[in-house]
Amino acid sequence: MKWRQVTLFSLYFSSSSALLVLNKIAITVFPNASVLLLAQIISTIVIIVTVGFLGRYEMRLVPDVLTIKAYSRVSAVFLGTIYSNFKFIENAGVNAFIMLRCTTPLIVSVMDWLFLNRALPRGLSLVSLLGIAIAGTVYAKNKVGNADVEAANFLTATSLTWGFIWLFSFILDMVYIKYVVDGYKCTGLEKTLYQNVLAIPILFVILLSPLETVAARDSVTEWTMRGNIALLLSCLAGASLSFAGMALRSEVSATAFTILGIFCKMASSLLNELFVERERHWLTFACMTIFITCSAFYKQAPERVAINRSRLDIPNT
């Protein structure tokens, strides 16, 4: 793995892990998820523009019309994925989300083959994808245990609907955004800036829609020092996660990026089990170990063009 990829992955992992915890605290300040997301998006824009100007990086503030159209769709898919994620977890619980999320690398690998010119996974990589799906499902079911309430919530019409919406949005997110970042040549700062700026009008529509049960004007409920610090840190983590995520999409395949996202969450859960909750159930650790091992052994599928060239002994140009 290249040093650039290692650096971006380290930034992505640390930001993702931190944001997972910080959002749980920050939501006490803004119980309206859209308001919290809006605060993080605006902060990201300010940080990206500031870094761009202070670092004197090349950055087009106003791209061409085709890029604007493409990144408008990126923003819509991005917000749809995040919002349906919030709603699915709210209705079905975290463990149901983990089970659904762990099946996505297999699905994305097929989408990679259909739309992004990647070969289908074979051999050890295919075994790794199956291992991720099985280990993640067993882990989540073990965490549910005898929690019949959570199991019942997963089977409600509302939960199933949001689960389907999230799954569709997530697959589209992985495939379409990969297509855009590869097809429209922009710097990492530009990609992050366009995605977030163009998300604001869409987010305002969601804010004014009946989807939110807490009105935006009533969303500020608890201005505590702890909540305010968490909100500030979540904005910083959100900005670094947004940048690292967009930059990483250019470096790896859609399937590999999907696995990286789940790996970050599972590794965070492992640290939480070891040092915070201290459950230390053998099946939980076994599933986590299998999951992390399978992730490490996965090798992203090569491009089909490269395969054909090698078979025909045609040098890459």
Image (cartoon, rainbow, N blue to C red):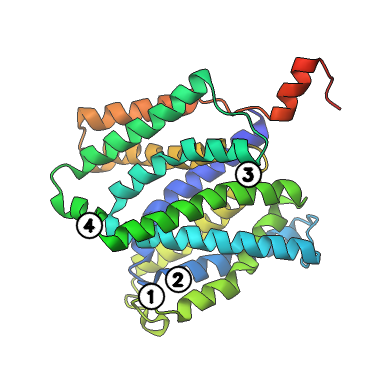
CA separation in Å, label 3 and label 2: 25 Å
Seen in the image, is 146 located left or right of residue 34? left
Residue 157 horizontal side relative to residue 108, left or right: left
Question: For the point 62% across and 43% down, which residue is it?
Answer: 248
In this picture, residue 208 sits left or right of residue 278: right
Left or right of 203 on screen, residue 313:
right
Q: Nearer the viewer, mark 4 or mark 3?
A: 4
Q: Residue at x 78, y 55 (%)?
A: 57
Rendered image: mark on residue 212: 1
Q: Nearer the viewer, residue 285 or 127?
A: 127
Q: Which residue is denoted by mark 2 in the rendering?
A: 34
Can you tell which quarter of the image residue 229 is in?
bottom left
Tell me, for residue 288, which label it has, or none. none
* Mark toward the start of the polypeptide (2 vs 1): 2
Residue placed under numbered mark 4 in the picture? 153
Q: Nearer the viewer, residue 203 or 80?
A: 80
Q: Disc 2 vs disc 1: Cβ atoms closer than 8 Å? A: yes
Mark 3 or 2 closer to N-term?
Answer: 2
Q: Bin the neighbour count of mark 1 within 10 Å (Cα to Cα): few under 14, some 14-19, many 20 and up.
A: some
Q: Identify which amino acid the numbered label 4 is placed on.
A: Asn
Mark 1 → mark 3, Cα distance in angstroms: 31 Å
> Residue 74, percent across and down?
62, 59
Q: Which residue is mark 3?
A: 249
Of the numbered discs 4 and 3, the one sitting upstream in the chain is 4
- Circle 1: residue type: Glu
* Total numbered circles: 4
Q: Residue 305: x percent and y percent?
A: 74, 29
